[in-house]
Image: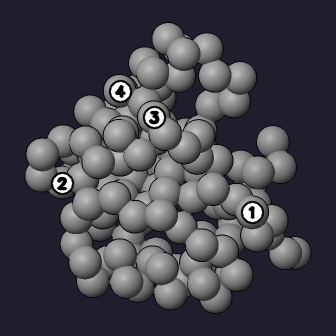
Amino acid sequence: MGLPADLKILLVDDNVLNQRVAVLTFNQLKLKCDLASNGKEAFEKYQQIPYDIIFMDLQMPVLDGIESAKLIRKFEQESERSEKSVIIALSGNEHADHRNMCIEVGMDDFMEKPIRIESLQAYISRFINR
């Protein structure tokens, strides 16, 4: 199944190597993504562009993924945006505590790194068809 090429995707990760791998993986799916290197930068970009999906690393300098997700959800409420962005947490270690914490702050799901093409396609497909 093909994915809509016009999806607005934001990848938030402070690791340049992770960014490069993710961009190549998105390209294999014929998708493009914008990049942010920390949660503060992600929130600033989100205020300008209503992304369809945000892939958010949890541990970053300046502002981590949890705090950034809280800001995004608060902004969505206050600005009364008709569509909420899907926020998928990214982490190298999946623990039930991490997953629960992400869901509690308003993230939609949790994805383990490194990003694999099959997982990426499945997550995107699930959320764009809801």
Element at label 2: loop
User: Dots 3 and 4: beta carbons under 8 Å?
Assistant: no
Q: Could you tell whether 13 is left or right of 31 in the image?
A: left
Residue pointed to by mark 2:
60
- At 12% from the left and 52% from the top, the residue drawn is 61
How is the structure coloured here? one colour
Q: Position of residue 94 (x, y in %)?
A: 34, 57
Q: Mark 1 or 4 closer to N-term?
A: 1
Element at label 3: helix
Quadrant of the drawing holding the N terminus: bottom right
Quote the CA–CA distance across marks 1 and 4.
Answer: 25 Å
Quote the CA–CA distance across marks 1 and 2.
Answer: 28 Å
Q: Mark 3 or 2 closer to N-term?
A: 3
Q: Mark 3 or 1 closer to N-term?
A: 1
Quote the CA–CA distance across marks 3 and 2.
Answer: 19 Å
Mark in front: 3 vs 4: 3
Mark in front: 1 vs 4: 1
Which residue appears farthest toward the right when viewing the image?
1
Residue pointed to by mark 1:
6
User: Dots 2 and 4: beta carbons under 8 Å?
Assistant: no
Q: Mark 3 or 4 closer to N-term?
A: 3
- At 70% from the left and 81% from the top, the residue drawn is 30
- At 75% from the left and 63% from the top, the residue drawn is 6
Q: Position of residue 42 (x, y in %)?
A: 35, 47
**Which label is found at residue 71?**
4
Residue pointed to by mark 3:
47
- Closest to the observer: 91 or 52? 52
Quote the CA–CA distance across marks 2 and 4.
Answer: 15 Å
Q: How many marks?
A: 4
Quadrant of the drawing holding the C terminus: top right
Q: Quadrant of residue 119?
A: bottom right
Q: Position of residue 106 (x, y in %)?
A: 47, 28
